[in-house]
Image: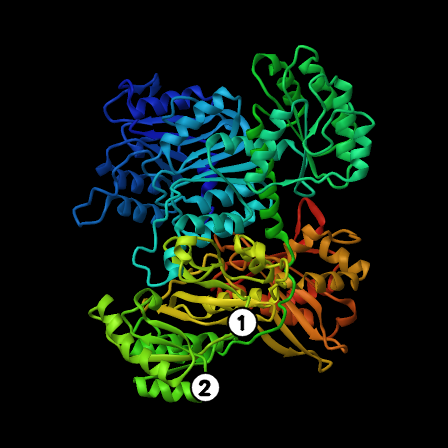
């Protein structure tokens, strides 16, 4: 991921069109027409050796003849010419090229290299960025740039649209023209050979002219770049996604239930949710959602009250809300009594609030005021069906006036056609979201709910784990390395359980035996009842082929089962190699729920954690959810509650609630297993029993790979535990230097409370009384791929820990420049902690290849300036900020 030269692509000062043409309806002619008619103020230079002029503009024979170096080149020439053109543009110093030509991956050069690879090689050697190939081009309406062959231009606006489909681009332009929607950027990525979603989201996320980002995704190429950029952008502005292709593509050769269940669309859903983005289904939903998020006040909760002048439209709205998982507000007795005072006696006293068809404008205002004042209501949907008695516009104006007096989250739906069009215009001018139908209005509300949930998950401070666990990584690796040495990629059930035990996951006692007689002996030692299972590398799902016998109560029963089971297996799997049996103690946990937990590997996003209802019918039931690792307690809990079976977990009738902390801890342990051991590509724990006492794994299956894991195997970089380091202050106090974690937010508040006003002024250049949660979350919930913060953590007298200081850097996407900031408690100063923290962050930045470290220091912060000088920084005053000094340290030779 890099934003290098993207300013040349999205803010060019000059444009060349390579392959510009006068031939009617050709791509080169259309691009020239669009550029000349878009209002672009810089030079537009056509290149065509066979034309003296194109569209009345003097043409140039080749790139070397251009009078100016173009910032951006639009390439519309045949495939074979493209690599040479890219090399020539790079040699001239051009920063970016949009290659509209298709077919570059299907043609090869004389040495067997595909044309796109040859073009990329030429571009990267010269620092030139490529948009496309096989793309529509791009539009930046704010600067009059239409470097595309689209049939329409775009209006200026605050929405950025980024698409992998050129056909969808033209459809969206059509739709936006009809609905008066403008764009800050309109970008067709095409084949995304160079500039990809991660690059563009990174650029748009910090673009002040872009209020929201809309994405049409067919496939992601760089998982970690995409997730890192999306998580950063979604903290600043809404990012909405249409993802095509909801059919599961992966897991065709899965050896486990998790592999079969974790369809790629589920994983895309999990990634979009984890990044704080919002997924919608249609183009109309996309723009409806972004307008809703822009116009409606943010939600405080999820409880919706529905106010209408007709029972039918109110019931339609309720049906849609409940069917799609929304929450209908339950009106309190006080609210009902307040409504009784202003509504006819015949109103049905419930939600939806039917104010009757003859409702005048004043009745709308009175009822809406009561609902927005109600503590049990978080948002109100006001609906109206036209009648001959009441003016639709008067009713709309009453709603507008009420909201102006008391701001609230209010959505509107004036149902009908011509009779309500004027009312809808009133809402639009007033900035209130309005929708044509109850279904659209409820859908918009649910978009707000889902967006709020995703944003909360992005910013929520996770609690500490219910108990700390330390995995025995060496024990798990011994089992896995042993299997790989024997050329086995499937661990046996006992081996799999050994791995789980190494990670603190409770398992039922299990032993391997080679014969029926040994099974009897082991069963007697363990005590009855026992379960007997076949041991065969050729049988993945043992119960499907008669390879499991449960509740064996005697030696005779065990012997009979062990003697008959191999024949049954061979009937179903004639080539099965039977290696013996596993004997395990029956776990008698009456009332426990059978669930499944495990690991699958998605071809796009890499390893994921799966959870859902378990048992032998797990694929048929299909009740599961997936999440990207790493997981903390909050993310694990969220994963659980996305399943249907979780509705039973709080308990009902005589069933007690499950021990939720144990279940969430187990999912965290599975997540840590993914982080620690790249060789695991699939894992089933099925059934996993969960009840009020905790969890117990009855069966487990692990699949391995020999392939070396890529560096970005995980979509989100996990906590880098390898960077932890113990050191000692001058006073002799031992401290742990470690990367910051989201769970550190409470300690960060305590740290902030112990700063002196001077500490705060030197760090923030201003006096700040306190930091809100949203800001503190940004400091503690960092993306280790793009920033780093090391805290100094020390033991307190009461056995807890406290933070004494913190140093952090934010690195640009090109890893060229890292900006640092540091703060240490005043009562700790003089102990050498500031220098220790600075040396830690300098060593880290140097190791990751960052070019330069910089920082800004107040001119009167002499202690920091002296420290910077000792560490080798140079300094200079800023011309526009004379009281601020910038210090700089080159990190590479």
Q: Secondary structure at mark 1?
A: loop
Q: Residue at x 27, y 26 (%)?
A: 48
Q: Residue at x 48, y 67 (%)?
A: 688
In the rendered image of this protein, does residue 18 appear above or below residue 450?
Answer: above
Horizontal arrangement in the rendering, residue 374 relative to residue 177 (left or right): right
Q: Quick check: can you spot residue 112?
A: yes
Q: Earlier in the sequence, mark 1 or mark 2?
A: 2
In the rendered image of this protein, does residue 51 appear above or below residue 758?
Answer: above
Q: Nearer the viewer, residue 277 or 388?
A: 388
Q: Give the quarter of the image for residue 310.
A: top right
In the rendered image of this protein, does residue 874 appear above or below residue 248?
Answer: below
Q: Position of residue 302 (x, y in %)?
A: 65, 42
Q: Position of residue 207 (x, y in %)?
A: 56, 39
Mark number displayed over residue 589? 1
Q: Residue at x 74, y 76 (%)?
A: 796
Q: Position of residue 84 (x, y in %)?
A: 26, 40
Q: Quick check: can you spot residue 573?
A: no
Q: Nearer the viewer, residue 271 or 823?
A: 271
Q: Position of residue 740 (x, y in %)?
A: 62, 64
Dot 1 and dot 2 residues touching (CB under 8 Å): no
Q: Secondary structure at mark 2?
A: helix
Judge the density around disc 1: few (<14), some (14-19), many (≥20) Cα neighbours within 10 Å: few
* Colour basis: rainbow
Q: How many marks?
A: 2
Q: Nearer the viewer, residue 709 or 585?
A: 585
Horizontal arrangement in the rendering, residue 504 relative to residue 869 (left or right): left
Residue of label 2: 526
Judge the density around disc 2: few (<14), some (14-19), many (≥20) Cα neighbours within 10 Å: some
């Amino acid at each position: 991921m890099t934003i290098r030269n993207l300013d040349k692509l999205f803010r060019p000062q000059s444009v060349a069109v390579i392959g510009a043409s006068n031939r009617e309806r050709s791509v080169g002619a259309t691009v020239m027409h669009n550029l000349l008619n878009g209002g672009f103020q810089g030079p537009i230079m056509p290149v065509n050796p066979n034309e003296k002029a194109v569209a009345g503009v003097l043409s140039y024979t080749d790139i070397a003849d251009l009078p100016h170096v173009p910032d951006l080149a639009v390439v519309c020439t045949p495939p074979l010419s493209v690599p040479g053109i890219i090399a020539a543009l790079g040699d001239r110093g051009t920063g970016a090229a949009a290659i509209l030509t298709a077919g570059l991956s299907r043609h090869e050069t004389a040495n067997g290299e595909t044309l796109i690879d040859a073009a990329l090689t030429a571009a990267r050697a010269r620092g030139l960025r490529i948009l496309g190939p096989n793309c529509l081009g791009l539009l930046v309406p704010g600067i009059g740039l239409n470097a595309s062959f689209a049939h329409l231009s775009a209006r200026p606006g605050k929405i950025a649209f980024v698409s992998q489909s050129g056909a969808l681009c033209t459809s969206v332009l059509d739709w936006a023209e009809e609905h008066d929607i403008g764009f800050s950027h309109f970008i067709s990525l095409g084949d995304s050979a160079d500039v990809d979603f991660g690059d563009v989201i990174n650029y748009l996320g910090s673009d002040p002219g872009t209020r929201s980002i809309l994405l049409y995704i067919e496939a992601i190429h760089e998982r970690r770049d995409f997730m890192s950029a999306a998580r950063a952008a979604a903290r600043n502005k809404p990012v909405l996604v249409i993802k095509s292709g909801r059919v599961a593509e992966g897991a065709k050769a899965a050896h486990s239930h998790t592999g079969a269940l974790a369809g790629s669309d589920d994983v895309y859903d999990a990634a979009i949710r984890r990044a704080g983005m919002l997924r919608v289904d249609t183009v109309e939903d996309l723009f409806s959602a972004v307008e809703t998020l822009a116009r409606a006040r943010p939600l405080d909760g999820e409880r919706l009250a529905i106010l209408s002048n007709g029972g039918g439209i109110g019931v339609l709205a309720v049906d849609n809300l409940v069917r799609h998982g929304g929450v209908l507000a339950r009106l309190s007795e006080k609210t009902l009594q307040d409504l009784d005072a202003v509504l006819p006696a015949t109103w049905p006293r419930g939600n939806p609030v039917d104010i009757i068809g003859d409702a005048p404008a004043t009745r709308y205002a009175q009822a809406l005021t009561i609902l927005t004042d109600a503590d049990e209501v978080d948002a109100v949907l006001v609906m109206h069906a036209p009648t001959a008695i009441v003016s639709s516009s008067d009713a709309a104006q009453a709603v507008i006036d009420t909201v102006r007096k008391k701001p609230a989250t209010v959505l509107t739906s004036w149902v009908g056609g011509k009779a309500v069009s004027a009312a809808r215009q009133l809402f639009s001018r007033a900035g209130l979201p309005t929708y044509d139908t109850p279904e659209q209005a409820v859908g918009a509300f649910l978009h707000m709910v889902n967006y709020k949930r995703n944003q909360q998950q992005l910013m929520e401070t996770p609690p500490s784990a219910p108990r700390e666990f330390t995995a025995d990584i060496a024990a798990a690796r011994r089992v896995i390395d042993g299997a790989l040495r024997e050329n086995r990629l499937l661990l046996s059930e006992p081996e799999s359980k050994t791995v789980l035990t190494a990670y603190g996951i409770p398992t039922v006692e299990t032993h391997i035996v080679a014969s029926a007689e040994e099974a009897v002996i082991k069963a007697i030692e363990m005590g009855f009842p026992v379960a007997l299972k076949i041991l065969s590398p050729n049988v993945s799902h043992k119960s499907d082929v008669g390879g499991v016998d449960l509740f064996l109560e005697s030696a005779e029963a065990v012997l009979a089962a062990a003697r008959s089971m191999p024949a049954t297996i061979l009937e179903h799997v004639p080539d099965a190699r039977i290696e013996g049996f596993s004997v395990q103690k029956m776990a008698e946990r009456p009332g426990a729920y059978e669930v499944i937990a495990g690991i699958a590997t998605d071809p796009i996003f890499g390893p994921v954690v799966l959870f859902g209802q378990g048992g032998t019918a797990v694929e048929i039931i299909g009740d599961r959810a997936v999440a990207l690792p790493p997981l903390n307690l909050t993310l694990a809990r969220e994963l659980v509650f996305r399943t249907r079976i979780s509705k039973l977990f709080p308990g009902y009738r005589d069933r007690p609630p499950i021990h939720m902390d144990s279940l969430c801890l187990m999912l965290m342990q599975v997540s840590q297993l993914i982080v620690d051991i790249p060789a695991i590509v699939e894992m089933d724990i099925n059934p996993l029993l969960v009840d009020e006492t905790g969890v117990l794994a009855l069966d487990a299956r692990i699949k391995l790979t020999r392939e070396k894991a890529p560096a970005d195997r995980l979509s989100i970089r996990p906590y880098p535990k390898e960077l932890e380091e113990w050191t000692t202050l001058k006073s002799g106090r031992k401290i742990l230097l470690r990367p910051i974690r989201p769970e550190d937010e409470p300690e960060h508040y305590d740290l902030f409370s112990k700063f002196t006003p001077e500490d705060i002024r030197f760090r923030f250049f201003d006096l700040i009384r306190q930091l809100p949660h949203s800001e503190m979350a940004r400091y503690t919930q960092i993306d280790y791929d793009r920033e780093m913060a090391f805290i100094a953590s020390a033991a307190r007298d009461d056995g807890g820990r406290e933070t004494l200081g913190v140093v952090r850097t934010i690195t640009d996407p090109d890893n060229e420049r890292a900006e640092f900031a540091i703060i240490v408690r005043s009562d700790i100063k003089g102990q050498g902690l500031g220098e220790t923290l600075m040396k830690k962050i300098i060593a880290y930045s140097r190791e990751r290849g960052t070019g330069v470290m910089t920082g800004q220091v107040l001119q009167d912060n002499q202690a920091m300036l002296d420290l910077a000088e000792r560490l080798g920084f140079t300094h200079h005053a800023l011309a526009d900020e004379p009281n601020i000094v910038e210090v700089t340290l080159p990190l590479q030779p």
